[in-house]
Amino acid sequence: MKLFCFALLLLPAVVTIGQPLQFRKINTSSSASFRGLSVVDNRTAWVSGTKGSVGITTDGGKTWNIQRIPGFEELDFRSLYAFNSERVIIANAGSPAYILITTNGGKSWKTVYTNNQKDAFFDGIDFWDDQNGLIYGDPIEGKMLLLRTADGGLSWNPVKEPPM
């Protein structure tokens, strides 16, 4: 069933491009399991995953630079959003929940949000422009974990519930 769903998702790409897809194994020398993917353009994409791992390709996937973020090696980074080859935001699944940002292609990472609640768990990130975005997660005490940024991910604040 998973293979069928994957093939169904790829069908529009095959029809649009008109060329058959080719799968090839790429050696990354990493034992991480990658769960997050953010494609910037035809050459640049970022992945994130287990063991505090994050990686980038700038040659269309031919080669990957995979790193483990120091101090976060035990985390599972399932969510990420890449703006370009330099600026990326990642968030982990589980507690404590962290949001990290790099503005130098992963040479250094800054923690911009921490949630120590036991049920904290980030599920996804999205931006609608360069500055404004959301991160959402599992409910905590019956309320959806929803954070917003208006400064490109440098700070995150809870989205308040609308009045009833």
Image (cartoon, rainbow, N blue to C red):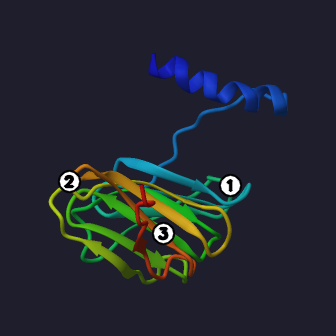
Front position among marks 3 and 2: 2
**Residue type for callout 2:** Glu
Q: Is residue 69 above or below residue 151?
A: above
Percent position of residue 20, x then y: 75, 26
Q: Is residue 96 above or below residue 28?
A: below
Residue at the image position 54 percent from the left and 83 percent from the top: 104
Which amino acid type is marked by label 1?
Gly
Residue 130 lies left or right of residue 30; in this view the side is: right
Residue 23, image quadrant: top right
Label 1–label 2 contact, CB within 8 A: no
Q: CA distance from mark 1 to mark 2?
A: 43 Å
Compare marks 3 and 1 and give the one earlier in the sequence.
1
* Residue located beneath label 1 in the image: 60
What x and y, as percent, mark residue 102?
49, 79
Residue topped by disc 2: 141
Instruction: Tell which of 23 and 46 is nearer to you.
Output: 46
What mark, if any, has residue 148 been given in the picture?
3
Instruction: Calculate the distance from the C-alpha at mark 3 to the C-alpha at mark 1.
Output: 31 Å
Depth-wise, is mark 1 or mark 2 nearer the camera? 2
Question: Could you tell me residue 129's position as x and y percent?
Answer: 68, 68
Residue 65 appears in the rendering: no
Query: Residue at the location (43% across, 75% down)?
Result: 156
Does dot 2 land on a helix, a strand or a loop?
Answer: loop
Q: Nearer the viewer, residue 115 or 18?
A: 115
Of callouts 1 and 2, the N-terminal one: 1
